[in-house]
Image: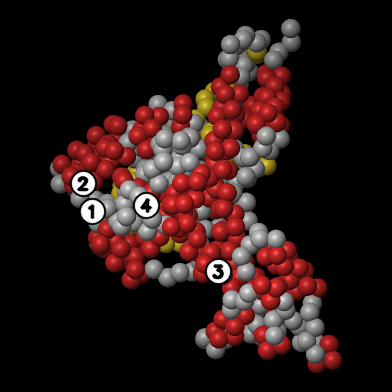
Amino acid sequence: MFWGHTGEGISSRQAEFCHRAYRLGTLTENNQNKGAFNRCQRSSKGPKRYQRPASGDANIPGSSVAVSRETNGKPTASPYQDKRESTQFVEERFGRNLDLSFASKAKELIRRRIAGSLTIESDPLGNWEKASESGQSRRSPSFSDSDVYLFPTGMSSIFSAHRTLLASRGPLKTLRFPYVDTLKILQKWGPGCLFYGNASSEELDDLEHRLRSGEKFLGLFCEFPGNPLLKSPDLVRINQLAKTFGFPVVVDETVGNFVNVDVLPYADMVVSSLTKVFSGEANVMGGSLVVNPKGAHYRLFKDTVESEYEDTYWPEDAVFMERNSRDFYKRNRKIYTNAESVCKVLQEHPRGREIKILDPRGTPDSLSAVKDVYYPKYSSTKWCYDQCRRVTGGYGGLLSVTFSSAAEAAVFLDQIEACKGPSLGTNFTLVSPYTLLAHYRELDWSSQFGVDPNLVRISVGLEETSDLVARFQRALEVVSKSRIGPE
């Protein structure tokens, strides 16, 4: 469970590298091979970067060609390495990926991209790209990419934020608004957690009462907006309470994302899963942690992170992440536009017209198969979201829908022409029975927070809007037909 909740571990590319090194006999327990590894990663110019390595580098794991040691005592390339070399050549030759020797540069570009998107106030594409290149903010000259830290996964960045609080503030109970894996981290690795599952003003009233009564907390963690009901906590009020009572705030803005919302002014640390919209390709993982230089606890957290942080983000993963995120801003606009169109289809079905339906008891009913649609734009907490929404920002690409029965949810899942899976933020639309996947063994517990067992979560992608709308209309039509009784 540790690996699953905390995101600590190695990526598939790192595992592949180590397996290849093990097979070639170059995997060692110390740094004896460090010089050789650096040689294979060295920078080169022009056409040389696509040439085979020198003979002295031929057996170095991670070089563009690794070889076997069999044929007549002479090294020969295996079909696997030939395929790998060909793939790497295409990636680099046509500008899709940087050469692996530029992995450190790729990480720098990612950090600058995040720093720029977090600090730019007016985000037309040109300004955003300019800020991303410089890593500086017109609003906060002190903020730069040096305050951005990269991690192998989003959950490992959250776990690091939690460890930073424990190391710097001691064993105090943590406050928590919902997300399942973050909640598990706070419950299992620390002195405990006070969980607020509704992101409501009443819960903040309770928190304020506890604080005024002298109760102390390690910090407050929340998503903006939450997952899967897309409710947004009141970050302005949370920030005011944090300043008054001296506790830090950690905000996970993965669902809202850097371009749509600006949560940095209300947080001491901002964490994000770069695996999601930032990458979009579903072929690499990554996470980030940003320490707010204007936060009340900046010096303490900055020093703690610097002393604890180890860059374990695998170089090849960083190269892919840098490539994928180049068009992050453009993709985001298309995704939230599509999401609003999908919401409209779900909200209007089949509302506004009567259909003859038989419920299990055989009595007529005119209720829609669609029970509720959850999206920040149509949430009762929209005003909280709008407090942080950028001028040209949207409401994200994630939404959820519930149906009147489990049977109808199943029909919808079977009929919708989209990929099925538990992630989000992909460039293609992804649908999942979220509650059954995330809370199968605790359905009663999740239900008390309004998470319906029949909830279907939809991460909207980059498909043509008209095609996407037509897919949802077809699926909903089949759901309707499954409910209509005989004339």
Identify the residue at horizontal 42%, vertical 35% (top origin).
Answer: 391
Residue pointed to by mark 2: 243
Question: For residue 103, which numbered disc appears in the image?
Answer: 3
Residue 377 image position (x, y, % from top left): 46, 29
N-term mark: 2 or 3: 3
Residue 121 image position (x, y, % from top left): 38, 43
Identify the residue at horizontal 62%, vertical 10% (top origin).
Answer: 353
Residue pointed to by mark 4: 137
Circle 3: residue type: Ala
N-term mark: 4 or 3: 3
- The correct choice, above or below, for 41 with respect to 318 in the image is below
Nearer the observer, 394 or 267:
394
- The correct choice, above or below, for 228 with respect to 54 in the image is above
Residue farthest toward the top in the current orientation of the protein: 487
Closer to the camera: disc 4 or disc 3?
Answer: 4
Q: Give the Cα distance between marks 1 and 3.
A: 34 Å
Question: For residue 296, which numbered disc appears in the image?
Answer: 1
As helix, strand or loop, the secondary structure at mark 2 comes to helix
N-term mark: 4 or 1: 4
